[in-house]
Image (tube, rainbow, N blue to C red):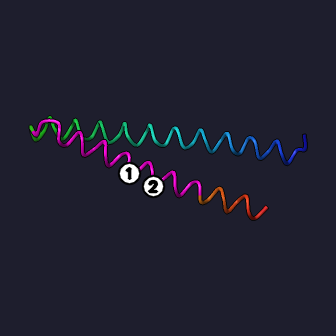
Amino acid sequence: MKKKDKGQIWTAFSLVGTIGLTMVTTVAVGLYLGRLADNWLDTGPWATVAGVLLGMMSGAWSTYKRVIEAEREMNNE
């Protein structure tokens, strides 16, 4: 296996790890802030649901940007 191929494999593993960590982190932050808002405003589960949905959308957007960036890097090589 060529060194360039090994580098691409590690780059792919890095991208997958980054995507997973990003999704978990953004949803966790949305969950935490939603629960905090629910406790403060006494709104039931609605702020938590909104926080989780916003976290999911934020994670998806961040993942999209990272994949586009990785694709550009691979095309420039």
On residue 23, the disc is: none
Q: Which residues are magenta?
A: 43-67
The quadrant the N terminus occupies is top right
Horizontal placement of 8 versus 69: left or right? right
* Residue bearing the label numbered 2: 61
Q: Position of residue 55 (x, y in %)?
A: 36, 46
Vertical placement of 19 versus 76: above or below? above
Q: Is residue 52 magenta?
A: yes
Quadrant hosting residue 14? top right
Magenta region, mostly helix, strand or loop?
helix
The quadrant the C terminus occupies is bottom right
Callout 2 amino acid = Trp
CB under 8 Å between callouts 2 and 1?
A: yes
Residue at the spot 40% in from the left edge and 51% down from the top edge: 58
- Secondary structure of the residue carrying tag 2 is helix
Callout 1 amino acid = Met
Residue neighbourhood size for the residue with mark 1, other residues' Cα within 10 Å, grouped as few (<14), some (14–19), many (≥20): some
* Residue bearing the label numbered 1: 57
Residue at the spot 82% in from the left edge and 41% down from the top edge: 6
